[in-house]
Image (tube, coloured by chain):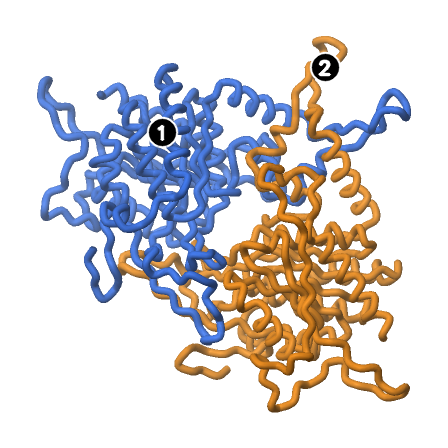
Chain colours: A orange, B blue
Amino acid sequence: MSTTETGTFFSAEEYFATQPPPADLEHDIQGVRDFIARQAKAGRNVVLVTSGGTTVPLELNVVRFLDNFSAGTRGATSAEYFLQAGYAVIFMHRQFSLQPFSRHYSHSTNPFLDFLEIEPSRDGTTSPPEICVAHEKRADLLQVLTAYKSVHAAGTLHTITFVTVDDYLWLLRAISKELAVIGRKALYYLAAAVSDFFLPRQKMSIHKIQSGKGSLHIEMDQVPKILKPMVDEWTPDGFIVSFKLETDGDLLIPKARVALERYGHQVVIGNDLHRRKFEVVFVSRKPLPPLPPGVKVEATPTPAADYDPENPPPDTFVETWLRIPIPPPSVPHTTNQIKEIEEDIVAELVRRHTQWMEKA
Amino acid sequence: MSTTETGTFFSAEEYFATQPPPADLEHDIQGVRDFIARQAKAGRNVVLVTSGGTTVPLELNVVRFLDNFSAGTRGATSAEYFLQAGYAVIFMHRQFSLQPFSRHYSHSTNPFLDFLEIEPSRDGTTSPPEICVAHEKRADLLQVLTAYKSVHAAGTLHTITFVTVDDYLWLLRAISKELAVIGRKALYYLAAAVSDFFLPRQKMSIHKIQSGKGSLHIEMDQVPKILKPMVDEWTPDGFIVSFKLETDGDLLIPKARVALERYGHQVVIGNDLHRRKFEVVFVSRKPLPPLPPGVKVEATPTPAADYDPENPPPDTFVETWLRIPIPPPSVPHTTNQIKEIEEDIVAELVRRHTQWMEKA
């Protein structure tokens, strides 16, 4: 670790050497391993979808924590479209964030109970009343329920939960290493809102921080950039998609380019906090020119030493904008009839991932 | 405001003079006002139940926030028992935290969809398949659904949501002032996990804090102690119950005593983070000795100037422990058959609140 006046920098290696793994890690990974083995046998592509925000606990007996805003809509919605496209999905999400299928009925006021009606039993007074689904909700619910039951029957969805950024980092490393066995058939869709900062175990207070002192000072260290070892070591053949969420739209493309240069992965999807439901931008490197037969190159080109990621040569990157019409505010979110931008995001990624597999 | 080297202290008055109200405040309060008027007409007691954690956003365009651990179980569960006891309930809760009735089916893996089964339609192939509730779930669900529908038919539950500690403080003040019109019939059950710290609007950054600087420093100010103006000004006749959650059990009773002395309200319910599902302690002042007829005293005795709340005279306070058997880990939380400590907490408070009303 190197300590400067602005904080301590942990490399990924130092992070995993000093911060404790989650208690259930071995058990969770055994489940993932079995799932991947079944999918590999069936010849399916597998996508790891991460979703929801990570927490940074301030105390060992957690009362307070720093959190990142995310309901998990992007991840849960995209997972459904990946399943539709024939992928097997490892859905690694923040506890209680939205999940595929049930997302249509979560996070509103008592939706489940408002759906249901009590009907007196048909054969008179002897048997108990029956519970049925309100008529106007039946068609939508039947569609979601049918898709849900068919995915469960096919065994193509595996769910893992995390809470803290520490859980997230340990799980991501372990799952990436497991998924590496299927090589280019693995897609990584890293939609979780991961904290940039963490509080090392060694600095945490054991009990709830007392408020008598008048003000709260928190000093956190930077989370190591794990995309770099992910590309270089954990899963070198995986097709890796990361996300950038910004509130200042002008930062999106420059920051996406820096990330691609630094970590060497395939796509950064940029989204502005207030426009993310109907507009995203794919940032990627331009394809290398075709090489003469027999010539091999590294999958990840190393930038020249004098390369300045803030001012790249104009033809190094390509941006692709995806946009859908802004839905009118009067349409309720719960109906299944609304076009979702995740449908287009997933279609474009499936296309690029297919090319990536064909190039192998 | 007074600024010391450890931070800026805001009085409640200074807080409301400098921090902005939530956008929907007027609209929300109109709804509460109408609800209280209906309950007053029906002669019902009304309890304000606050529930769930508050956030402290770090940015105006919120990406990161400090949060307080709380799923909202205590508040949602207690609200059901208050409704059973004939109270009208204003349920003021953190967005997406647990709610009465739906709590039985939230926060687990796809519970709603796993409950439902698709049955081919009875009359052959022409009509669509039907959706029905899995047989083994029917009895529990029917019980919850019946209670839910009957509360909605009676109009005795009113729900309000908050997200930030600022929302919470503004709503609490406004609702307390509205509830003051029913005098001693108002009960306050302040189970929300409210942040002790906040970031004044004037110190927030507009955009997402960038991580390039290596570490994150946050300095927050102390949230004003609003129980004091609540007792003295907003709702002087209300029966007010606050909660103390600690991870160090030794702090519970001393801190509860300090709170009672400082704020002059009626009960502090203390709970240890790890034992809160089966053990709580009620801390209150001993009843004053009966006074000769015609003699009046202040409802809130003012402590003598030399009173040291850390070392009170031994007979000033009374502690009442409530305990239920620790449920065996094998019993799933979702069944309705488990004894919940909130049943006993609410029964004891209804008893004390009734005495309080009779004393008036």
The correct choice, above or below, for B212 with respect to B119 in the image is below
B54 displayed left or right of B184: right
Closest to the camera, between mark 1 and mark 2, is 2
B117 displayed left or right of B85: right
**What residue is drawn where x is 30% and y is 51%?**
B223
In the rendered image, the quadrant that contains the N terminus of chain B is bottom left
Q: Nearer the viewer, residue A211 or A83?
A: A83
Picture quadrant of residue A126: top right
What residue type is disc 2 on? Ser
Q: Chain of mark 2?
A: A
In the rendered image, the quadrant that contains the C terminus of chain B is top left
Q: Nearer the viewer, residue B188 or A144?
A: A144
Residue denoted by label 1 = B349
**What residue is drawn where x is 58% and y is 35%?**
B104
Does dot 1 land on a helix, a strand or a loop?
helix
**Residue B137 spot, x, y in % from top left:** 69, 30
Characterize the local packing of mark 1: few (<14), some (14-19) or many (20 or more) Cα atoms within 10 angstroms. Answer: some
**What residue is drawn where x is 50% and y is 82%?**
A1
Whether labels 1 and 2 share one chain: no
**Residue B5 spot, x, y in % from top left:** 22, 66
The tally of labels here is: 2
Task: Please give the label number shown on residue A233.
Answer: none
Residue denoted by label 2 = A121
**Residue A346 spot, x, y in % from top left:** 74, 57
Does dot 2 land on a helix, a strand or a loop?
loop
Q: Nearer the viewer, residue B146 or B359?
A: B146
Q: Is residue A231 visible?
A: yes
